[in-house]
Each structure stands twice: as C-alpha cells, then as structure tokens.
Amino acid sequence: MILHDDDKRVLDGEGGEARRLAMEMLVALGKIYDAEKLIPIQSAHVAGLSYRSHGDAGMHWIEEMADSGARVSVPTTLNVIGVDRSRDLGLPGEWCDKQLRINDGYVRTGCYGTSSCVPYLYGFVPRFGEHIAWAESSAVAFTNSFLGARDNREGGPSAFAAALVGKTPCYGFHLDKNRRAHVRFRVTVPIDDLADVGALGAYVGSNIGVHNPAFAGLRPLRLEEHIYLSAALASSGGVALYHVEGQTPDAVMLGSGIYADNYDEVEIGPQELIQGYERLTSNSNRQVDYVAVGCPHLTLNQVAEVAALLQGKKVKDGVTMWVHTNIPVKAMARQMGYLQIIEDAGAVLTQDLCTVLSIPEQRGLHSLATNSAKMAFYAPGSNRLRTWFGSLKNCVNAAFTGCWNA
Ligand code: F3S
C-alpha cells in the first residue's frame, strides 16, 4: 500500500495520538482489502452508537478520546441512538444516561449530533462520484445506489477512524470495477405498497448475499421507496449497492454497462414476493401490544401519511405506538399540525431513536407490528419482539384494535 508523506507523518504521531491510532486502523484495513492507497473523503457518518453496542467500555473509550482532544477532520454525522432527547419514554434512567454520555462523547469530537439514519435528507447530501466513509448499512446502500456516491459498508469504528483522518482505503465500492451488478432481477409482480418494496428487498437480499443486484421492470420508485429498498437489501443481505434500470444514476449513465460479465437472471413473481413477506414475519400471536414505524426514519411526507390514518381515532389502551423520525422532521411535523394529530391519537412521534437500537422490550412489550423490513428483520433478535410485517394501514389498524388482522 502506497502511503503519501502526509499519511506517514500522521502514522508517526504528528497529528496526535487519536489520529495515529485511526491511521493504523485504516492502513490495516487497506492491507486486508489490498487497497493501493488512501483517498480523501468528503464526509463520514458514524453508526453503532447505542449503549447496547458500546457498553461501559465503549462509553469510557469515546469520553477519553474526546478528553484527549481527538477531533474529526471532515463533516461527520451521527446515527440513531437509543433514547429520545426530547422526552421520557419510560426507559431505564441509568441506561439513558449512559447512552447520552456516548452521544455527547462523539459530539465533543466534532461530530454533528444528528441522531438519524437519513442525514442525506437534510443537509448532508453526498454527490455523485464523491468518496465518503459512512456506516449504517441502509444509508450506505442509499448513498451508493440512489445518489451514486462511493462508499463501503463501514462499521462504526472504521467510519470514525476515517472521520478523524479524513481519508479511507481505496477498495471495494470506491472502484468502478466493483460496482457492476451480478444478478438481474426481473420483477414481474406489481410492487404497490412500501411493504411490497420491503418484501422485495428482503427476498433479494437474503438470496444475493454481498453481491450487487440490479432490478428490471420496476415502475419509477418514490424517494421513500428507495430508502426502504436500501434498508431491506442491506439488512436481509449484505448489499451495499443496487441498480434499478432507468432509475439509479449508474444505471442511467451506463445502461447495460452496469452488468458484470456472465451475470445471472432471476424472475421475481408473486411467489417470491410472498416468500419475502414470510421471511419478515416471526409472529403467530395475533394480539399486538406494540406498533412501530419509521425504520429508516420517516420523511415529512410519511409522517403526514401516518397522521392522516390516525386523525380522529385512538390507539387502543395497552398498545404502544412509536413513530420514528428525526429532529428536523419532527419540528416540521409540529409546524404542520401532524405532531398534534399523532399525539391526540395516543401515538408518540419520537426523535433520535429507533426500536432496534433502543430497548422498548424493557417496557414489557412482546408483539410488534411494523411496515419496516429492516425492523422486522432485526427486532426478533435485538429486542426479542415477535413481529408482524405488512402495510402501514394494517399496522395502524393493529394499533387501534390490538390485533393483527391482515
Ligand atoms: Fe435507522 Fe434504526 Fe432502522 S438506525 S434504518 S431506524 S434500525
């Protein structure tokens, strides 16, 4: 691996101990993946901030980093955490305090406390062809695929190391040769609802592993549908990049040039879509005590949809409904009156957190309904929640009745 003189000086400790350690990690990663060099990045996004993943050791580590003067050198956003900084959601106080200490530690290193998995929707928008080091698998798939940025599936530590140094090893999706599609999925079944998009992503993700899928035959997908497709592909599989013929930028620019030599062709029909739904449903008890939507965090448009379904109705006693979004969207929802409608119905519009990275199960919740493929995939393991997966309308109905009737 060829290191620039500046890189060598950082490795010799010229930029301080935190940058030296970060550079060591990046060089080690580069050697593992046969990177020829380090390349400058324009931004970073650090994930894995939950107290669930950091524990006490990680909390003390980031506090010591911040105390020692470690500072990021590119615009760096922070992913979702496990608490809502605006309100008490009835989660254990000590757990929340420690979660906030972790977040504050990163903020003291110069990161922006965005607490969201969709910072690309509000001001941190990677451009086509730009090299970045983002963690959060759904955001990686979205920025690579929908925006055409160049990003690998960073973990929290490697994204933070890249943020400190301002560079990342040049391998994987930073190289055009690795951005070709290996399988062309010809979609012959109608994809109508956001949940259909999730089921499609779950089916393809679980079948393709870490290869790159391309889709043919899809109607033009809305922004939110691309966000949900990214999340489903990245969670059910290891997908970091997908193409949609005629829609995503690499596909528009390269046409059939997006395909690798000898790519496979697979048809997605009604049976495959049903299998996608089945993979995301782990529940058999039709009683529902928890409804959660907003994974990835909802856009204002989606919050408006939720408000329209909840307007003038009431979430059933004994059912908790959390609607996950971020600070900017919640502020706009307040201005638009959606927040009032949602809260009048007895649901909660959360900011900063999400089900998977928080601990709603510690409030005694067991049976979840969601329209998010990523939440449905992870919640059984991370939150011990049995899960129904389906449309937003079905989820809201479950909130009204306490029962999954789809
Ligand atoms: Fe975002 Fe949490 Fe889902 S980070 S993608 S809301 S699991």
Image (cartoon, rainbow, N blue to C red):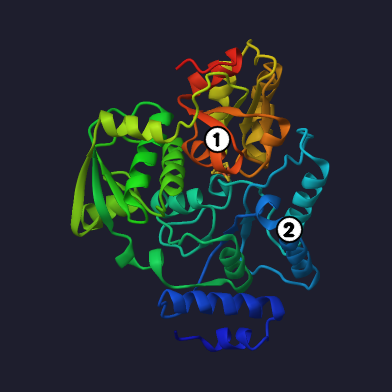
| Extreme residue toward the top, this view | 312
Quadrant holding the C terminus: top left
- Residue drawn at point x = 31 percent, y = 50 percent: 213
Residue 301 appears in the rendering? no
Residue indicated by mark 1: 299
Asked which quadrant contains residue 246, the reply is top left
Q: Percent from the top left, x then y, of residue 358?
A: 67, 42
Of residue 322 and residue 69, the one placed in the foreground of this image is 322
Tell me the residue at 43%/42% (across/down).
232
How many dots with numbers? Answer: 2
As helix, strand or loop, the secondary structure at mark 2 comes to: helix
Please state, as top left, top right, bottom left or bottom right, where the N terminus lies in the image. bottom left
Give ligand 1's quarter of the image: top right
Name above or below for residue 375 compared with residue 66. Answer: above
The answer to whether the beta carbon of the residue marked 2 is less than 8 Å from any atom of ligand 1 is no
Name the quadrant containing residue 90. top right
Q: Earlier in the sequence, mark 2 or mark 1?
A: 2
| Amino acid type, callout 2 | Val
Q: Would residue 282 appear left or right of 101 to someone viewing this image?
A: left
Question: x%, y% of residue 248?
Answer: 34, 47
Q: Nearer the viewer, residue 67 or 74?
A: 67
The CA distance from mark 2 to mark 1 is 24 Å
Q: Is residue 234 above or below residue 61?
A: above
Q: Nearer the viewer, residue 44 or 356?
A: 356
10 Å crowding of disc 1: few (<14), some (14-19), many (20+): many
Q: Position of residue 309 (x, y in %)?
A: 55, 17
Name the disc covering residue 107, or none. 2
Query: What's the amino acid at mark 1?
Result: Thr
